[in-house]
Image: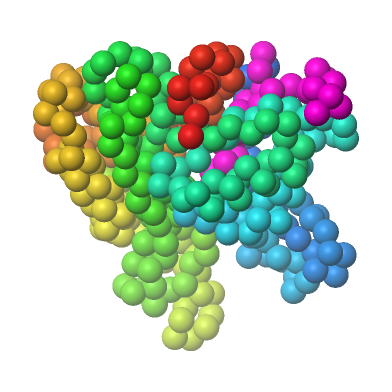
Amino acid sequence: MFINTIMGWFSSDMAIDLGTANTLVYVRNRGIVCNEPSVVAMSQKLGKVVAVGAEAKRMLGRTPGDIHTIRPIKDGVISDFDVTGEMLRYFIQRVHNRKTFIRPRIVIGVPSGITQVEQRAVKDAAISSGGREVYLIEEPVAAAIGTGLPISEPSGNMIVDVGGGTTDIAVISMDGVVYSKAIRVGGDKMDESIINYIKRKYNLLIGEMMAEQIKFDLGSAYKLDSTRQTMEIKGRDLVSGIPKTLILDDDEAREALSEPVNQILNAIKMALENTPPELAADIVDKGIVLAGGGATLKGMDVFLREETSLPIIIAEDPLTCVVHGAGKVLDDIDVLRKVVM
């Protein structure tokens, strides 16, 4: 215990947004120091990690047989405990310039639907990676704090955090979650929908990276512009087995994304149905705040505004809301006690 305390003096307290798509690390007094994809490349021959983050992501689908690229977090939960531990250890040591004797205090953002077993897995992974004390905070609560919503007041604040693996919806009042709903639909499901749509319509198999590129360049939830946009996509023809190129337009990309986007809309409607009337009245005035990478999908705010008739506000920096919120909690021990799980 005494040794832990001594090590704590030389360690920087950290906040981590352990996301399905990206892991962000915030260090007290330094801000965000790391924003890397949650991907690890493992060598079976050597039995060790060969790359983590952006370097490992570049290897996706391009590795020889003995090297496997792993996404250790699927649908917002840890699917590979050992690899997650290795990834966390890499990020923690990188922040502390690869020093070994470090024991930082860590706050980690996790999806609101996380089970007790999954909570334990996240805590154990962080402690085995060098954490002294580990606290978990629900991602929508962290995102609300990060966007500056007045969650301590007795009024309704609704936040929708569209991440890589999950969409977290929460109504928050007086530092507590009144209603929360987490659905396993996010950026990854959108990529999957694009892959399936192109396979169904054109008999063309594309990779994850190409699907992600289509989502960023052509994808939208609502038609904003009458100008037709197109892009060239490459994949393998499933009939002939030969690589092939074709042109995809924005209408097709929007059609491909319609299923996951509508699932998010239905979850928001369910949350509104389950919100107490007084808090629902506050949401009519304040609107719904969108955070997470999915908030950057073109036309997402317009689509939700049209369907719910409520004001929709996109957070100032939707990708970093969760980690900034967790970082603010690190600095205020009183808030930490109120909002940790």
User: Quadrant of the image for the N terminus?
Assistant: top right
Q: Residue at x 57, y 41 (%)?
A: 18
In screen coordinates, is 222 left or right of 63? left
Is 129 positioned to the left or the right of 303 in the image? right
Residue 262: x and y, percent? 23, 52
Residue extending furthest toward the bottom: 240
Q: Was residue 28 drawn as part of the magenta stretch in this picture? A: yes
Q: Which residues are magenta?
A: 1-29
**Depicted 311 relative to depicted 21: above or below:** above
Q: Looking at the image, what colour scheme do you see?
A: rainbow
Look at 47% across and 54% down and name the residue there.
Answer: 75
> Residue 161, percent across and down?
38, 37
User: Residue at left 63%, top 65%?
Assistant: 61
Query: With 327 as the anchor, is 54 left or right in this view?
Result: right
Q: Is residue 335 above or below residue 84?
A: above
Asked whether residue 217 appears in the rendered view, the answer is no
Which of these two is toward me, 218 or 64?
Answer: 64
- Where residue 103 appears, as percent x and y from the top left, is 78, 30
Q: Is residue 66 above or below residue 92?
A: below
Q: Is residue 128 magenta?
A: no
Q: Residue furthest front?
A: 1
Res 131 visible: yes
204 vs 304, nearest the viewer: 304
The quadrant in which residue 50 appears is bottom right
128 in relation to 7, above or below: below
Residue 65, percent from left and from top? 74, 74
Q: Looking at the rendering, which quadrant does residue 5 occupy?
A: top right
Q: What residue is drawn where x is 74% and y is 21%?
A: 12
